[in-house]
Amino acid sequence: MSHEHPASIEIEGLVKEFKKGPRAVDGIDLRVDPGEIYGFLGPNGAGKSTTVLMLTTLLPPDEGTARVAGYEVRRDGARVRENIGAALQEAALDPFLTAREHMRLQTALHGLPKAERRKRGDSLIERVGLGDAADRKVGGYSGGMKRRLDLALALVHGPRILFLDEPTTGLDIQSRTALWEEVAHLARDEGVTVFLTTQYLEEADALANRVGIIDHGRIVAEGTPESLKAEIGEPSVEAVPSDPERRGDVARVLERFGSGDGECPHAIDQSIAVRLKGGDASLVDVVRALDREGIEVAHLQLHAPTLDDVFLAKTGRTLEGSGQSDAQAPAPADPREPAASGAATA
Amino acid sequence: MRFRSVTLGIAWRTLHNFFRNPTLIVPALLFPLFFFTAFAGGLSRVSEAPGFDYAAGYTAFQFVFVLLQASAFGGVFTGFGMARDFESGFGRRMMLAAPGRTAIIAGYALSALVRAVFIWVLLTAIALATGMQVGGDAVDLVGLYALAAIVNFAAMMWAAGIALRFRSLQAGPLMQTPTFLILFTAPVYVPVDLLSGWVEAVARVNPVTAIIEEGRELIAGGGADALPAFGAAAALAVLLAGWALLGLRRAEAAGG
């Protein structure tokens, strides 16, 4: 396959095997293009973080090659580090330092000119909404504030590629939404390539241009969220008649729109469900048909395939933690779309 | 340029925490002062033992040991901080940002030296205030503090090697115990010629003996042949710097 632009991240046959353990990463290949948000989705222990550690030069691969920003991670580690920013799974912050002091350290670590350090640090602190807390010790910060500071620290040297390892784990809805908006803004408006690992389906769905699903160290599926879901099948419609006696009539109507490919997973109790052969566009026709037949409907719902369905289809299991993520997940507007206000705030 | 920037950044942060955190600074000050008071004050009659012919007096005799001991433990305690940083994940932040990771060790080493200088100033002021005799000239004293600086560096490198291999504060005793043993099997209370038995045998092969004895000669103004002491100190420093660098490679292989 040929590509017009050099990849931001290019991996071939990457392997990491820990002593007395299974292969944490078992020969993965992937490519992430500049400006893309790549969602790396998988359950705990799937190999997501190990992959990130290798790509960020924190852990040497055992086999295979990985090029980040055009540099090979083993041979040109220092060059890779110059071009990347990373916020790892746990925000490693010093509880005795303030946000401003963290910035001072981080700008020194990245060798920013002294004259720019203060300005750059202050602007990033403001950008992630920590201006009022900038001179407070980080030990007293909430989880969301720590994550935002960690993100700001990762951006201090203007990296071309940003690695975010489960950035919203444990955050409340407000903090999660703010972080999503900031990440989307980075990719959309600043052209930063984002490699995002997550075990939250809706996070990958909402943010990522493309998703790679990893399980037991191998990539089991890759594509845009839409294409992956389309592989699973058409959306389904579920209906519950107001009069239970008319269940048969509802079934006959729905059959006309169904793809006839067997059992639909969403049919439960009194409901009847079919996969729509015409996709979600045929929902309107379903409603019209039910109306023409004079059937009153108590409940009508369209179920689009989710990434969890994709994960189930590819691995035979549901994604661990998806229940938790569903419970916590907000339903914000797609953050990849330009914000109406024109400014992403955290 | 980046090496210097990383080194200074890490040293600044380590010192910032040291000077602002009473749980770090108070023990670092109290221990050498306690040892100096106990050894120089409480054991001063040891100098009346037959054959004890140190010209500068027992206060100067013990000052040198406490100075070197405080320098060594300043290095070890900096290693504790390094282990804590790697245990908490803060080490990864530094590993991710620094283009050349040797600068990380250099940053901790610089902070260990500044800590040591701070303690030297205090200890020297107290020793002089309590009547310590100084027979050596300025060159001798520079030599004494240079020896202390090398000991500080060597101890820091030892502790860094442990910290980077274990990346856990639980490895603290591994940093501290050998340092304690090598210091206290040197001639602490009397000159090496007054020791006997296995203690003397161990002291004579202990490289720290030459360093302590030369330090005592320097403060008394008689440090004519400094080569063995500086040679031993430099050899320890080089050896342990290699140990720390290998530890860094181990930390890199383990993912920070």
Image: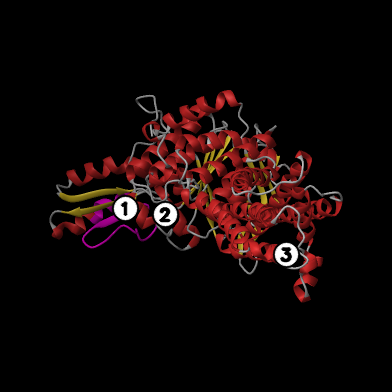
Residue behind mark 3: B190
Q: Which residue shows up at 57% across the image and 54% down it? A: B33
In the rendering, which numbered label is found on residue A327? 1
Subunit of label 3? B
Mark toward the start of the polypeptide (1 vs 2): 2
Q: Is residue A239 left or right of residue B187?
A: left
Q: Secondary structure at mark 1?
A: helix
Looking at the picture, the colour scheme in use is secondary structure
Q: Is residue A44 left or right of residue B102?
A: left
Residue behind mark 2: A308
Taking the image as drawn, is residue A14 in sight? Answer: no
Q: Please state which amino acid type lies under the numbered disc 1.
A: Ala
- For the N terminus of chain B, the quadrant is top right
Taking the image as drawn, is residue A273 in sight? Answer: yes
Q: In this view of the protein, which residue sits in the foreground, A328 or B19?
A: B19
Expressed as whole percent of the image width and height from the top left, the position of residue A268 reads 26, 61
Instruction: Using the numbered discs, state the Cα–Cα distance from disc 3 to disc 1 in whole angstroms.
Output: 72 Å
